[in-house]
Image (tube, rainbow, N blue to C red):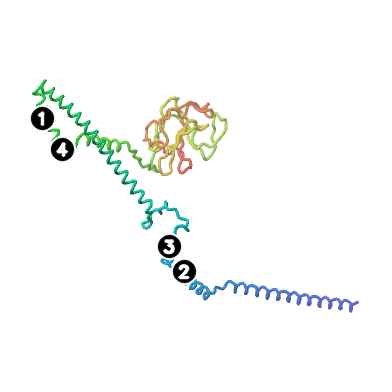
Amino acid sequence: MARRNRNNIGKERIIMMASAVFVLTALTVTGLYVRTNNRAEREDYVVDFETLEQSSAELAENMVSGEELDTLFAEVGTDDLDYDPSFQEANSLHVENTEIAGKADQKKNAGGENEKRSADDVKTISEAIEEAEKAEDKKREEQAKKDNPVKDSKEEKKEGEGAVQQEGMFDETVDTVMSGEVETEGISTTVQPELSFGEEDNLVWPIVGDVLINYSMDKTIYFPTLDQYKYNPAIVIAATQGESIGAAANGRVNSVSYDRATGNTVVMDLGNGYELTYGQLENITVSEGSYVNVGDPIGTVAVPTKYYNLEGANVYFKLTKDGEPINPLTKLK
């Protein structure tokens, strides 16, 4: 029995050694195969600079110079090319279409003759009208002299002075009219003021009234009409319907829109990322893009929306910096 166990152990050892030799042999063969393939791939990626230089030299020899190209195209002729004789390359100093140029000259000459003729005709007609007007004026002057010779002599003197002034000086009337036009344009030009609201700047109350619902972004606050607790990024100021609402700071109107909760709403840019939102408005007097100074009226208090029935007439007033709400009470003085 012991001899049989020894034989089995010996057989197992022989089998294990044979397996180990087989595995090592397989790994060795695999490593050699992979190494051979990598070396072949590296050889494929080697750049043969001598071959590149030879190819460049052959390409340079086979290249045709610009003069030779011109000669070849001259021999071929324009009939064999895709060429439009009416086309002239933009911004080119060397392309010229003699056929079109000749036609243009002919048209120009014909047009010049026609213009000259029409100008002569117009000149003749205008001269005839001027002569008729002068004759009529002369008759009127002669008749006026007969009626009042003293007055006519004074008028002649004034007319003579006016003629001298007209020949030697500018017409002040025309100059005045032109300056008036320039002044009008200067006044009508909209000067856009620079908006520079900062941390040290304050706001004025848009309307005098108690705060019905305070600013609260740290915790929820009770809304009577909604009968629920919510965060409030603004303050709700008690007001009287029809009461005027003034701008709390200088700014530019970004938008005038309608919101279900705040009704007619105006958003105003104060500069440096600050924005003011006014809600519950009517009879709005500002428009998008307009500039408003502090205290200027922007509208009146409207009937509250259904979200603020129990609160009554009010003004929704919100301040933000780069889109983040700020307690307006910290800025209101």
N-term mark: 3 or 1:
3
Q: Which residue is mark 2?
A: 63
Q: Which residue is mark 1?
A: 157
Q: Secondary structure at mark 2?
A: loop
Label 1 Cα crowd, 10 Å radius (few <14 / some 14-19 / many 20+): few
- Front disc: 3 or 1: 3
Q: Are circles 3 and 4 on residues that touch, CB within 8 Å?
A: no
User: Is 13 situated left or right of 219 in this image?
Assistant: right
Q: Residue furthest top?
A: 147
Tell me which numbered mark, 3 or 2, is placed earlier along the sequence. 2
Please state the horizontal and vertical placement of residue 4, each as a whole percent of the image.
89, 77
Q: CA distance from mark 2 to mark 4?
A: 74 Å
C-alpha separation, residue under disc 3 versus residue under disc 1: 79 Å
**Where residue 132 sits: x, y (%)?**
20, 29
Query: Label 3, label 2: how many angstroms apart (C-alpha)?
Result: 18 Å
Residue at horizontal 33 percent and vertical 47 percent from the top: 106
- Label 4 CA crowd tier, 10 Å (few <14, some 14–19, many 20+): few
Quadrant in the picture for the C terminus: top left
Spatial distance from mark 1 to mark 2, Cα to Cα?
89 Å
Of the residues shown, which amino acid type is indicated by label 2? Met
Q: Earlier in the sequence, mark 3 or mark 4?
A: 3
The residue identified by callout 4 is 167
- Reply above or below: 190 against 81: above
Q: Nearest the camera: 37 or 198?
A: 37
For this view, does 55 lie left or right of residue 13?
A: left
